[in-house]
Image (spheres, rainbow, N blue to C red):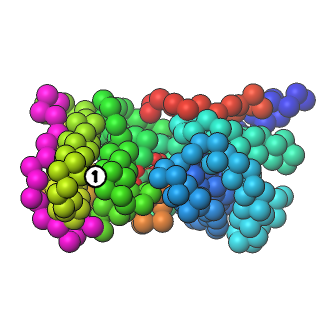
């Protein structure tokens, strides 16, 4: 039987298999990660080699450096993931990989490794979208959580409000028309001389400050579920540059606090509005900025006021990891979608739907 026909048969057989073990790979940015996930929710291993220290000296991720370090790390991480999971290659049912969105050179390392592995083990290869993976991180942290719900997706690459009607049915309610919110956090941190990644640094520093600056987000998007963060980012950058030129002190804690309050107000209010609009009583946060303490605090409080159940992944599953990819792949297998052949390649941009 031809290779892809055989894979289709194996893939379809997994729909009814009781226990499905997915080996998943993630390399879209600066984390090389391999996981083994059983039945979409049970993480047997989730090994992450982070390159944060390597990129810190450049103030951000250098794509070429990221790719090279993925190449160096991936084989060892794979061995470690199997070992930690306590299973052999023969127990794996499918290989899943993030094929986009992300840095194309970084993604290619994971995609090529996954293709080689799937071929060697004669297993179906599942192509998973990184943003869908972020949503799935919540299924790991909340074993009883099921769609439908509204998802506030907030990462370094994406900011969006999605209606998640089913595991594989996503409708876009709104998205950022320019910068992702994580990008704005990182840029604001960088201009104030804070280390990469800036989000967690702003989060920490903001606790020591107060809302001294009246930063704003675009009013023109008020009646939509779209976001814009480039304006506020520029406002902060200009403020810091002006102060530097005048030799004034840069009160970083107050700037961090004011910036964070403004963007989290915008995210939290629109997320609640989206729940009301979509008639949903569950709100789920996904992505790295979901680790932000103030965002979680605000969304949680507003959810309580509005009788909406609130979910966010535990910290370790907020930022990039491959367990979330393994979880998403399981639900794709069950719905019979996502089977890829060996022509699979990396995509820098992937549609949400
Ligand atoms: O989801 P993620 O790991 O990668 C992408 O898919 O982009 O998100 C990374 C982003 C970075 O911009 C980082 O600064 C931000 O998440 N981040 C935070 C926090 N922790 C990570 N932003 C605000 N507050 C945090 N505590
Ligand atoms: Zn991510």
Q: Residue 217: within the magenta?
A: yes
Camera-nearest residue between 75 and 72 = 72
Camera-nearest residue between 238 and 94 = 238
Whether residue 158 appears in this view of the structure is yes
Q: Is residue 240 left or right of residue 334?
A: left
Camera-nearest residue between 89 and 159 = 159
Camera-nearest residue between 100 and 259 = 259
What is the chief secondary structure element of the magenta stretch? Answer: loop
Residue 245 % position (x, y): 22, 48
Relative to 113, does residue 179 appear above or below in the rendering?
above
Relative to 49, does residue 332 appear above or below in the rendering?
above
At x 37%, y 53%, the residue is 190
At x 48%, y 65%, the residue is 316
Q: Residues within 10 Å of mark 1 (few under 14, many from 20)?
A: many
Q: Which residues are magenta?
A: 205-221
Q: Is residue 266 left or right of residue 27?
A: left
Quadrant housing residue 80: bottom right
At x 36%, y 40%, the residue is 180
Whether residue 264 appears in this view of the structure is no
């Amino acid at each position: 039987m031809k290779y892809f026909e055989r894979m289709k048969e194996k893939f379809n057989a997994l729909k009814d298999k009781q226990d499905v073990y997915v080996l998943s790979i993630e390399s879209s940015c600066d984390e090389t990660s391999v996981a083994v996930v059983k039945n979409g929710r049970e993480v047997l291993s989730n090994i992450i080699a982070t390159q944060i220290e390597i990129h810190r000296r450049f103030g951000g991720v250098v794509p070429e450096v990221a790719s090279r370090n993925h190449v160096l790390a991936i084989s060892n991480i794979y061995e470690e993931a199997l070992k930690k999971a306590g299973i052999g290659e023969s127990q794996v049912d499918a290989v899943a990989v993030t094929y986009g969105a992300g840095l194309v050179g970084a993604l290619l390392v994971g995609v090529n490794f996954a293709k080689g592995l799937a071929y060697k083990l004669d297993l179906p290869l599942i192509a998973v979208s990184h943003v869908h993976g972020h949503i799935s991180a919540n299924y790991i942290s909340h074993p009883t959580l099921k769609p439908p719900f509204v998802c506030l997706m907030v990462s370094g690459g994406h900011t969006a409000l999605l209606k998640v009607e089913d595991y594989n049915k996503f409708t876009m309610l709104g998205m950022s028309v320019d910068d992702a919110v994580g990008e704005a956090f990182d840029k604001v941190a960088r201009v104030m001389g804070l280390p990469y990644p800036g989000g967690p640094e702003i989060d920490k520093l903001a606790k020591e400050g107060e809302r001294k600056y009246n930063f704003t987000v675009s009013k023109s998007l008020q009646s939509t579920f779209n976001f814009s963060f480039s304006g506020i980012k520029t406002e902060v950058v200009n403020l810091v540059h002006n102060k530097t030129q005048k030799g004034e002190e840069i009160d970083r804690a107050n700037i961090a606090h004011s910036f964070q309050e403004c963007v989290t107000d915008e995210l939290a209010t629109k997320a609640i509005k989206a729940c009301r609009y979509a008639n949903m009583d569950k709100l789920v946060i996904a992505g790295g900025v979901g680790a932000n303490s103030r965002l979680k605090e605000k969304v949680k409080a507003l959810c309580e006021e509005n009788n909406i159940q609130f979910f966010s992944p535990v910290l370790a599953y907020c930022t990039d990891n491959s367990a979330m990819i393994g979880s998403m792949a399981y639900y794709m297998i069950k719905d019979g979608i996502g089977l890829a052949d060996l022509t699979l390649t990396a995509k820098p941009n992937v549609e949400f739907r």
